[in-house]
Each structure stands twice: as structure tokens, then as C-alpha cells.
Image (cartoon, grey):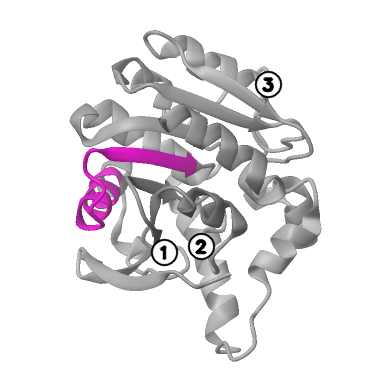
Amino acid sequence: MSEPTTTTVDVNGHACRVWTKGSGPKIGFLAGFGGLPRWIPFLDRLAESRTVIAPSMPGFPGATGHNILDTHLDWLVAVKGLLGQAGLDGADLVGSSVGASFVAEVAALWPQSVRRIAMIAPFGLFDEKDPATDIWAQRGDDVPGLLCANPQIYKDLKAMPPGANSVEWPIEQTRASEAAARIFWPLQNTKLERRLPLITAPTLLIWGEGDRVIPRTYADKIAKAIPGGAKITTVAGAGHLAELDQPDAVAKAVLAHVG
């Protein structure tokens, strides 16, 4: 598996890594909880027919600058700027979990900046009758099993590779959880449902059949709120980060949607 090309862009005076691989029409990816400390098979599947661009949001692996983003509006403007600098204006966008919430926000507030969108179990909603899991309240050892049907996949994603800085690597992984908390803690509720009716881009929702973080009922709520609805695909053998558990199945669904 060849490595992607790495560049950086500046967001609010802080460097954010951008990974690029493949050829063909551009497709952007905003990662889920924990970010992308390393390239993943799901992105390789997309790169077989698309130019995959995966920018790292502030505070997630490969980027800094989350500690100056104090409000949800701060985050929205920062992510929109990041996508623009990464060359993704007008492109198809895919997001997972935390990243999927921002894909929805960008599609709602800047509809001209996206073509088609696909979202894997997005954060941003809250139903007190069917609450999402507060992932920050869980024991560290339990988190991999909440995020993936196969916990070892998440453990491998986060495992320090040979040659990595033994001090900086764990700090970077902890920083990613902190960055997500600045956006979504404690209830993951950003009132996203108020902006979903502004989405005009054709939308695909992907849910892992074994998602233990965001209830499957949220997919129906999101689809109902988007004018014209959204297609929902449920992936067997997958947890919250379905793209990690079942990269081939999720990539196939995404590519079929974006055409």
C-alpha cells in the first residue's frame, strides 16, 4: 500500500496536514472520532477511481490550532477554510462521525461548495428518548469496542508505528479526543437538525449495523429532515466507524452514490 502525498495548509496560523492520493475527480474525506493517525484501507479503495483528499481538522492527528476555536461558529469557519485550501470547493465530500457532522454543516451553509455528500453516522443530534453514547465518559479500554465492531482495528489505527516520537505520538492521540470534545461534549448536540433542511446536495447516510455510539434511529431523523430525503445504507459487521470495520463495503456504497 503506497503512501499518500503530504502537504500542509494554514488555518488561523496553524498547520493542518492534507493527504492526497489517487487520480480522477476529487473526493474529500473528514475523519471520524480520533482522526487519522495513519492512512487507512477505506481511502485506498476510494483512490482506485478518485483523487482522495483527506485534510486533518484542527487538533486532530496532523494538525494543531483547536485550542483557539471557542465556539461552534469558530469551528465551522475553520473547517470551511480548511476544505477550500485543500482544493475541495465544489467536490464530493465524505465524512465519518465527527467529520460527518461538518460535512452536513458545510453542505447546509455553503451549498455551492459541495456536489454530493456521504455521511457515516454523523454526530450533532441528540434525542433524550434515545441518547447517543457520551464517549468521553467511557473507560479508555472500552473505547475501541464502542467505535469498531472489531476493537483491534481501532487499536491498530492508534498504535504507535516504528520510528514515531514516543512522547509526541500519545499526546497527539489524546489531543484528538480533546478537539472532538471542544466541539461536541457532553451530548454531541450542536442542534444540527436546525440546519439539515438547508441541505440540497444528494445525500447518502451510512450506518454500521453494530453502532454503539449513535443510534440507528438518528439516520431516519436526518433523512426526514433533508428536503427530498436521503438514501440510507446499513453495513453489516460494522460499528460506529464503519469505514474502518468494512472498508470495501463502505467505499463501494460511497462510490455508487457519487457516481
- Residue 20 lies, with reference to residue 99, above or below; the image says below
Q: Are marks 3 and 1 in contact (CB under 8 Å)?
A: no
Tell me if residue 82 is in the magenta stretch.
yes
Q: Compute the Cα span from label 1 to label 2.
A: 6 Å
Q: Secondary structure beneath disc 1?
A: loop
- 195 with respect to 182 (left or right): left
Query: Residue 258: percent from the left, percent from the top?
Result: 42, 31
The image quadrant of residue 225 is top left
Residues at marks 3 and 1, CA–CA distance in whole angstroms: 29 Å
Q: Is residue 19 left or right of residue 139?
A: left
Q: Tell me, yes or no, whether the two marked residues, 1 and 2, touch with CB atoms within 8 Å.
A: yes
- Amino acid type shown at disc 1: Gly
Q: Is residue 189 visible?
A: no
Q: Nearer the viewer, residue 132 or 164?
A: 164
Question: Label 2 sits on what residue type?
Answer: Ala
Comes first in the chain, label 3 or label 2: 3
Which image quadrant is residue 208 in? Answer: top right
Q: Could you tell me residue 48's position as x and y percent?
A: 49, 52
Q: What's under tag 3, amino acid-wise?
A: Asp
Q: Which residue is mark 1?
A: 59
Q: Which residue is tagged 2?
A: 176
In three-dimensional space, the C-alpha distance between marks 3 and 2, rounded to whole angstroms, equals 26 Å
Q: Which residues are magenta?
A: 76-95
The residue closer to the viewer here, 111 or 196, is 111
Q: Residue at x 37, y 45 (%)?
A: 27
Label 3 crowd bin: few (<14), some (14–19), many (20+), radius 10 Å? few
In the picture, the disc for residue 130 is 3
**Is 258 placed above or below 194 here?**
below
